[in-house]
Image: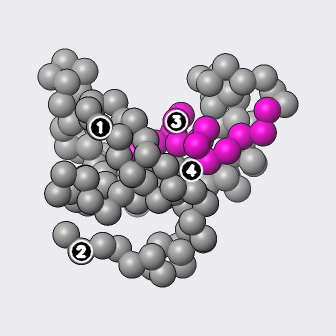
Amino acid sequence: MERIAKETIEKLYGKIVDTRDLSIEGFKRKMHFELYDGFGYCENFQGHEYILKYPKMAFVKCSIEAQSAIRQLLGYDKDKELTILDVLQRFNRLFRDGKEIAFDAGTKTYVEVNSFNVDY
């Protein structure tokens, strides 16, 4: 798979915020991600491209409910300033090679997630 150009990602999500090796449930090894505001990119992990999607900080700062959910999950008090790492721990979606996947606790594997229909 060809890498998504860094310039393209930066047009959509701004400059890179951090790079981290993240432990993701169901994977035995950590995955190296470039982290942007609302987007994480792992160019190649065992031959696959992985993308993490999570809310942008501007949204989280405007949503008391989102802030509360993050703080509750992580055990933070109401005055702790939240980071992108905090946001992606609570609200995240994982894509492998362009398809959304989710961990199935029963089979202990990742399965494709079906999108839902939206009428307009």
In the rendered structure, the answer to whether residue 7 lies left or right of residue 17 reads: left
Q: Earlier in the sequence, mark 2 or mark 3?
A: 2
**Residue in the picture at 61% in, 38% down:** 86
Q: Report the mark closest to the observer, 4 or 1.
A: 1
Labels 3 and 4: the sequence-earlier one: 4
Residue type, mark 1 in image: Arg
Residues in magenta? 80-94
Above or below, 41 against 106 in this view is below
Residue type (three-letter) at the residue carrying disc 3: Gln
**What residue do we see at 17% from left, 57% from top?**
47
| Residue 29 circle label | 1
The disc, 1 or 2, on the residue closer to the chain's N-terminal end is 2
Q: In this figure, which residue is indicated by the disc labeled 4?
A: 55
Q: What residue appears at the point 18 percent right and 31 percent down from the top-left corner?
A: 109
Q: Give the Cα separation between the discs numbered 4 and 2.
A: 25 Å
Tell me how far mark 4 sits from mark 1, CA to CA: 25 Å
Q: Nearer the viewer, mark 3 or mark 4?
A: 3
- Tag 3 residue: 89
Q: CA distance from mark 2 to mark 3?
A: 27 Å
Quadrant where the N terminus is found in the figure = bottom left
Asked where in the image residue 79 lies, by quadrant, the reply is top right
Q: Give the image location of residue 22, x and y in percent.
A: 43, 41
